[in-house]
Amino acid sequence: AQRVTQPEKLLSVFKGAPVELKCNYSYSGSPELFWYVQYSRQRLQLLLRHISRESIKGFTADLNKGETSFHLKKPFAQEEDSAMYYCALLSYNTDKLIFGTGTRLQVFP
Amino acid sequence: NAGVTQTPKFRVLKTGQSMTLLCAQDMNHEYMYWYRQDPGMGLRLIHYSVGEGTTAKGEVPDGYNVSRLKKQNFLLGLESAAPSQTSVYFCASSKGLWDTEAFFGQGTRLTVV
């Protein structure tokens, strides 16, 4: 079964500290993975996708097939990074976009 | 560009009442999704559609029905609302399935009393 696991409900750090939001997945085949973000009072939006290998707002995520992980990282957190972050997996077999339970990131000044 | 628009934004229902949530997109997207967002459970897929006239069940379809009569609209119906359906509902659309971004609506907060 396809599944996305985000083990942390809440992650709190101080401004300037490194951040790593964990995401593990289970999927038979080659996954397409994404990180979506929801800032306060805004709609959910795409942050980055693994296939693009891009860095958005200083965030990066590397797909590790051996560990079935797609952790989101940023070396120096900013207060404006405070938001809800969702890891998502695209299932080719079933045409579904499946989300994890989300991690709330709080960055304190 | 309006993008994805959900109607209504808020609604309070009594148990047993019915209602329809409307999702409209103006991006000519093929794929549309309905999710519910609950604390500690993230986004769960209710139903989705891969094109006009087609619908399919997601993870939590019970108690909901959907229709995609027009490409730009995806309707989510609750025939007999229950308190367990109190949630925030999000609609999303995407151009296709492969490697494309999903665009979300602003959400509908539904309370069933």
Image: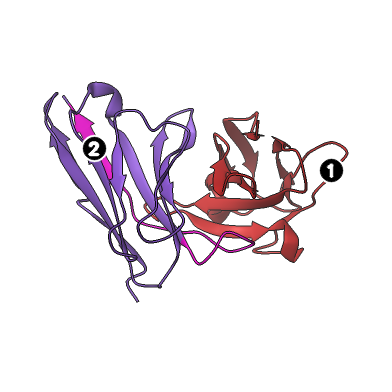
Residue B97 relative to residue B51: left or right: right
Please tell me which residue lies in front, B87 or A98.
Answer: A98
| Magenta-span inclusion, residue A37 | no
- Res. B107 mark: none
Horizontal and vertical percent for residue A69?
77, 40
- Residues at marks 2 and 1 touching, judged by CB atoms closer than 8 Å: no
Q: Residue at x 77, y 44 (%)?
A: A29
- Res. A65 mark: 1
Horizontal and vertical percent for residue B112?
19, 28
Quarter residue B111 falls in: top left
Query: What residue sits right under mark 2 in the picture?
Result: B110
Element type at marker 2?
A: strand
Residue B52 relative to residue B81: left or right: right
Color of chain A here? red
Q: Residue furthest right?
A: A66
Asked if residue A28 is positioned above or below residue A82 in the image, the reply reads: above
Which chain does the numbered disc 1 sit on? A
Residue A71 relative to residue A8: left or right: right
The colour scheme used here is by chain
Between label 2 and label 1, give the one nearer the viewer. 1
Q: Residue furthest bottom?
A: B1
Please tell me which residue lies in front, A2 or A18.
Answer: A2
Horizontal and vertical percent for residue A54?
73, 65
Question: The chain shown in purple is which?
Answer: B
Horizontal and vertical percent for residue A61?
75, 52
Q: Residue at x 48, y 29 (%)?
A: B41
Determine if residue A54 is in view.
no
Q: CA distance from mark 2 to mark 1?
A: 39 Å
The amino acid on which the numbered mark 2 sits, given as a three-letter code, is Leu
Q: Which residues are magenta?
A: B94-112
| Magenta-span inclusion, residue B103 | yes
